[in-house]
Image: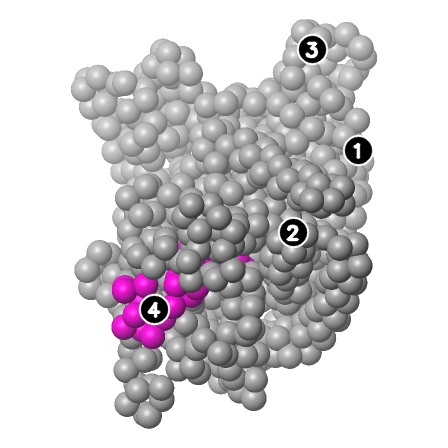
Amino acid sequence: MSALDIVLIAAIAAALACAVAFRLRQRKKGGCGCGCEGCTRSCASKK
Amino acid sequence: MKLSELELGKSAVVSAVGGEGELRQHFLDMGLIPGTRVTAVKYAPMGDPLELMLHGYELTLRLDDAARIEVGPAGAEAVRGYSKPRQGKREHPGLGEGGRFHPKGSGEALPAGTTLSFALVGNQNSGKTTLFNQLTGASQHVGNFPGVTVDRKDGVIRGHPETLITDLPGIYSMSPYSSEELVSRSFVLDEKPKAIIDIVDATNIERNLYLTMQLLEMETPVVVALNMMDEMTGNGGSVDVNAMEALLGVPVVPISAAKNYGVDELVNHAVHIARYQEKPLRQDFCGEADHGGAVHRCIHGISHLIEDHARRAGLPLRFAVCKVIEGDALVVEKLGLDANEKEAIEHIVVQMENERGLDRSAAIADMRFAFIQRVCEQAVTKPAESRERQRSERIDRVLTGKYTAIPAFIGIMGLVFYLTFNVIGAWLQELLEAGVGALTGAVDGWLEAGGVNGTIHRLIVEGIFEGVGSVLSFLPIIVVMFFFLSMLEDSGYIARVAFFMDKLLRKIGLSGRSIVPMLIGFGCTVPAVMATRTLPSERDRRMTILLTPFMSCTAKLPIYSFFIAAFFPRYGWLVMLGLYVLGIVVGVLAALLYKATLFRGEAAPFVMELPNYRMPGAKNVLRLLWEKAKDFLQRAFSVILIATVVVWFLQSFDLRLNLTDSSQDSILAAVSGVLAPVMRPLGLGDWRICTALITGFMAKESVVSTMEILFAGGAQAAMTALGAACLLVFSLLYTPCVAAVASVRRELGGKWAVGVVFWQCAVAWLAALLVRVIGLLLGGA
């Protein structure tokens, strides 16, 4: 496995970690649903 | 004579209001009280509902409901009009300003550091959200349809970090009629904001002041923002602000939220009254001389009786008294009155009814409207019929005309779909596809040249680029679709669609108002489910929520386009339209089934205000498009990226986690194979199809990205045209995505949400089977 392969694997892993963190952060912010604007607003009204 | 028998163009005066419960209260709150002059404007194209003009605005009512209202001939004495206000300079009361009740900079201010919380309250479609956006710099969506805001939203007023303002759904009175109205009332009563900003549509001042009067009873500082003053003065009207301020006993600030005029002054007044807790100077609107003072004596008598109860329950006294007289069960329960007190109150109220000649609710509503009339007589010069009104009438001759409404609706929707899928959206999509294709090719070349490991190479090109790229190319279509839906809503057309579709929707057990969530459902099911909160009846709301998944959302477009391009390229437009129509037809059948089983009974009454047509604001539309594009891109680079990599992983490794060349031996094949027997009767027994459909539960767009990965050699090789047709029908109808199911769970609860998932899958399975059987009978393979 070359250095470039390792760099690419690291980049993909980082991108995935970012994507997962982003969704989790959105869910946490919204508290429920998928974290989109609709769900966030829906949750806000139930607080 | 009944109101339903009133001839078009003729006027009459309301003599008695029938009906019962919340509906009757809603009639009264909307201004349909004995003594009010009403004019029949038009009937909907199918003969029902009826559009009325009263108190200077337009209200729609079903004939069945109009038949509950008795009217008599309109005489000059019955006209609730008002002459030019008294001329001459009137002293500025200076309410809400330093120097009037205490020297500037002094007074008993709330302790430093106290958050000044504001409730932004007003009638539906009075411009609350526009003002909220101006005040906070937020970017909430506004529309020209009563009830766009279905939730409360918080923000901080720009330049005032110590403030917190909450935008609430529009309400017509403090007697909650729909669940969103309850949100507003509960907020004001339970969360006790430091002050209320009451936004009043100056072009429709009489009906708007009805709510103002109830807010003045809340023992909370109030500032009245007279919105749309530019429109009012532009049509020759005016308001003597000093006179109105003196009569209402609260600061009155003329503004134009859309043009950001007067907003700074409003903020100064609002912050001042909140900081110094300057409550309304007036709460007593009942005149001693009004009809012998019957209402006046009743209110004040009960006021003494329940004073201690109101204090203990934390309810504003005057508000509690009016609600007790009206028979508001929630308030009566909260007060905890004993039998003796209830009996005494009942005697007082009956006496008032006898003396006043009106029932309790009508008497209270009449007292309020009588005061409003006095205020208007002294402070308001009514504008001539506004240009906006005249323009709306001209447009409505075609768009809600007897013979033109339905063809115009079909034409407009057809044009929207044609422009979205064939012209603008398609052109932009091709452009983006070409860009994504070129980038994929370039990356492919770089990886090849760099001698990258074959597996990583495949993951990047076949997994990530083709998966995410294929979904990304649908961004233009989705944005264009939302652009048109937003234009229709902002212009005021959607409210008309609700008006003329009411009779049709009533046949399937729904009210015309249900058309709005359904149309939004063509965009996205999540906001559609939330939009059902504007529906006044729980029965209608539940039924509409269950029907929105049948409306094909934009996230399914990539699936349709993918299969149409592969199997039906010559009939693309027809197949696309057919799928949309099929969704509606199955929805109608489901509605008939619901009506006969789960939701027996009649749809809620159709009492709705028709706003004037307005030119959609470019800023508002662009803001919405940016929100949708951002949301889509976020999904593409998060959920779909994760899904594509997971799918690629599962199809590249076998159960022993060894890399496999044949997808047939992969983990994915093993897992999806369990579902394959269920789908086999539909001709969709291929494990790859089952996998794609499972990933579609996370996000519909994932179906295509999964297909791209799994059908590397093209879907045509693995499927027939009939199979593709069955898959299209199944995708159209099967379970909505997890976000939509979550919103159903929020609105209806977990059991209903699980029910929706299984029910939609069952309906989809049956419909796809039907398509397959018909296809086989016609000689398909």
Q: Is B689 colored magenta in this rendering?
A: yes
Q: Specify which label sits upstream in the sequence, 1 or 4.
A: 1
| Chain for disc number 2 | B
Task: Tell if the residue under mark 2 belongs to the same chain as the one under mark 1.
Answer: yes
| Chain for disc number 3 | B
Q: Looking at the image, is mark 1 or mark 3 nearer the viewer? A: 3
Amino acid identity at mark 3: Gly
Q: Specify which label sits upstream in the sequence, 2 or 3.
A: 3
* Disc 1, SS: helix
Amino acid identity at mark 1: Asp
The residue segment tinted magenta is: B676-702
Residue carrying label 2: B456
Residue B294 sits in quarter: top left
Question: B349 or B216: which is nearer to us?
Answer: B216
Residue carrying label 3: B113
Residue A17 in percent (x, y) is at 62, 37
Residue carrying label 4: B685
Residue B14 sits in quarter: bottom left
At horizontal 72% and vertical 53% (from top left) the residue drawn is B452
The CA distance from mark 2 to mark 3 is 57 Å
Q: Looking at the image, is mark 4 or mark 3 nearer the viewer? A: 4
